[in-house]
Amino acid sequence: MRKILSKCILVLLLCQVNSLIAQEYTFKNYKWEQKPEPFTAPEAYKNENEIIVSRTIKIEVVNDKNGPKQYYLLHDKIFINSDDAIEKNNKIYLPFSSNENVVKNEARVILKSGKIISLDKKDIKEEVDEERGIKYNYFAINGLEKGALIEKIFLLEEAPELNGKTFRMQDDLPILNIDFELIHPNHLVFKTKGYNNLAEANIDDKRYENKISISVKETNVPKLEDDEKYSNWKANIKHFRYKLDENLYNGSKNLYNYKEFAANVFERFNAELDKKSQKSVEDFCKSIPKSNNLQEQIWNIENKVKKTIPYNRYFDKKENLAEVIKTKQANQTEILSLYLAIFKHFKIENQIVFASNRYDIPFDPEFESYENLDELLFFFPSINKFMTPTEIEYRIPLIPNILANNNGLFIKGKEFAGVKMGIGEVNFIPIPGVEITHDVMNITIDFTKDIENPIITNEMSFGGYAALNFQPIKDFAPAEQYKEILKSIAENYTLQEEYTSLTTENDGTDFIGKKPFVLKVTFEGKDLVQKAGDNYLFSVGKTIGSQMELYQENKRMMPVEIDYPHSYLRKIKIKLPKGATVKNLEKFTMNYKTDINGKTEAAFVSDYKTQGDEIMIENTEYYNIINYPLEHFDSYKAVINAAADFNKIVIVLNQ
C-alpha cells in the first residue's frame, strides 16, 4: 500500500528533475587496494572470533536521462580469527537476486602469508531453501584460514529509496571502522536521524560539485550480540534513518508526510462502489451472523472473510469487489476494500492503522517515514480494540504481537466544509494484557491407592496468545497429525508418551479470541517417583511442565522486551494415604517480584497449606508489561528462574 503511494510521489519528482543535466555517480570507479596491508587484531579484540575491520556503505541518488536512479555500494573487510569463523564464512551470500542490475560483484580472501585468492563468477553457487521456496546466490570459498581477511564489494543500480530507509551501524561483531555516506543532488534536502548514541551526521556541500554528502562515521563500535533472551536487538543497536524531505527545484516541502498519505488512503478507499460490487457485498453480508455485541459482530465478519476469501499480497488485481467475492481471492488492496465495504454495511465505525514490526523497524513518532507503514490493522474506537485483516489465524481482540506495543498511523474521516477527508494521527497500539493471556492449571496427584504410582490429572486452560499457539492447529493439520501434536504437548507435562486419557476443548479457529484452549490429561505418575530406603521421592514440580531458565553469563546489555503480557495460576492438590508424612513442603514458599516505579510488574509467588491428608499448593506468576528497564534485569531474571526452580522441587513421602 505505502509502496504504491510512494511511487506516485516519485513520479512527481521525476517529472520535475528530468530537465536537469544527467549526472554520473561519484564512486563509479571505486575499487579495493591492489596491495592490501596485513592485518593484526588489536589487543582489545584479539579473542574475538571475527572482526569487521571496515565497513563502507555508500548510497547515491543521481539524475539519469530516464529519471533518478540510486547506486548502492557495500565494501566489507572481515578478519577471521577462529575455526567457528572459518565455518561461518565459507560462503559469502550475495545481497541481491540474479535479476537485479549488478554493476560490480567482487570478493577475495587475503591469507596470512599475503597470498590473495580472488573469487569470480565461476565461484558463485546457488542454494535453494525448499521450505520457503527462495534461491540464494553465494561465493563458495576454499582455503579459508585463521588470520585471513575476507573482502567483498557489491555495487548495485536500483530504484531510489526516498520514502524512508534505515541502515544498521552496529553488528553482533565489533566494527573497527564504519563509514556511511548518502550523496544526492543539491536541489534535494534529506531529513536524517541517528539512534542509540550514534555519531552526528556531517553535511558537506563542498566535497562534490553540485552534490551534497551526508556522512556518518564511527570507530571501535562494540559488538551487541543478538543472543540475549527477551530483547529487541534491532531497536537497541546504533542505526541511521533518512528520507527525502524537500525538492528545492520545484518548491516541494515535507515530502512523504503522513498528512498526505492519510488523505490519499482515505480518498482511495472511500470511493462509491459500482452497483455490481455493492450488490455482491450486500449478498455476502447476508451470510454473516448478526450480533448486538459489537466485538462479536466484528469477530463474525472477520471469521467469515478469512474462511471464505483467501488473501495473498501477490494475487492479481480484480476488476472490482464483485470479482473478489466471486473468485474468492483478494490481494492487499482488495481485502482492505472488502472489509471497509462490510463495515460500512454494518455501520461499524473504524479506522485504518498503518504499523511496523517493532522487532524490525520500531515506529518513531518523531520521524515521519513510510518505512513505518508496512503493516495493516483496523481500529474500532467504540470498543478500543484492533483487528488484523491479513493474518488468517488471528481473531479480534488478538493481533500480531509484533505490531503492538508500538506506534501506528491511525487514519479516520473528518468533515471539513461538508467534505469528508482523511486525517492521520500517530497513536500507540496497546496489546491485550494478562486479562486475555491468563493460563490456569489445576493438578490433582492421588497417592491414596498406590504411593509408588500416583494417578495424576492435569487440566490446563490456555487463554489469549497462549491459546493461539494451539487452537488453529486443528483446522490446518490432518486429524492423525493433530493427534500426534496433542501427544507431544501432553508429554511436556506427563514426561512420558503414555497416558490414561487426553481430551481437549475449544480447539479450532472458531474459538480464537473467544474461549481458552483446554487440555485435560490423566496419567500414571510412577516415572516421577523414586524409592530411597523407606522414603519415596516425588518430583512434584515437574507436573507444571518444563520452564524457561534465564542465565546471563556475560553482562546484560539490552533491556528486557517480551512478546506480550501474560500470567499463570497453578493449583496443585496432593492426596496422601492415611498416616503418610511429607518433608520439603517449605520449598513451595517462594516470593520474587520486579517492582518498577513503586508497582509490581512481574512476580512469582508460591505457598502451600495442609488440610488433613491433603496438601494444597498454589502459585501465581505474571508479567504485566512488555518492557523492563535494564536496571531491573536482575529482579526480572529472579522471577523467570523461580518457575524453573519450582519445576525442580522434590518432596519426600514416608508411609
Image (tube, helix red, strand yellow):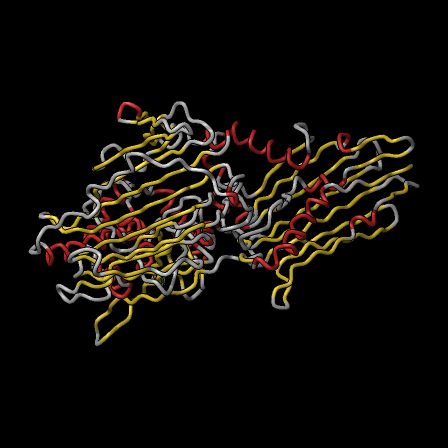
Q: Residue at x 17, y 51 (%)?
A: 62
**Looking at the image, residue 13 lies above or below residue 654:** below
Q: Nearer the viewer, residue 336 or 146?
A: 146
Q: Nearer the viewer, residue 316 or 63?
A: 63
Q: Residue at x 13, y 64 (%)?
A: 250
Q: Residue at x 47, y 54 (%)?
A: 236
Spot occupied by residue 593 in the image (x, y as percentages of width and height):
68, 58
Outermost residue, left side: 19
Q: Nearer the viewer, residue 136 or 121?
A: 121
Residue 417 visible within the image: yes
Q: Residue at x 13, y 54 (%)?
A: 14
- Determine whether, in the image, residue 45 is placed left or right of residue 373: right
* Rendered image quadrant of residue 75: top left
Quadrant (top left, top right, bottom left, bottom right) of the C terminus: top right
Q: How many marks?
A: 0
- Determine whether, in the image, residue 522 is placed left or right of residue 53: right
Outermost residue, bottom side: 417
Spot occupied by residue 380 in the image (x, y as percentages of width and height):
40, 62
Spot occupied by residue 607 in the image (x, y as percentages of width and height):
77, 53
- Determine whether, in the image, residue 489 is placed left or right of residue 233: right
Residue 400 visible within the image: no
Spot occupied by residue 510 in the image (x, y as percentages of width and height):
48, 45
* Rendered image quadrant of residue 330: top left
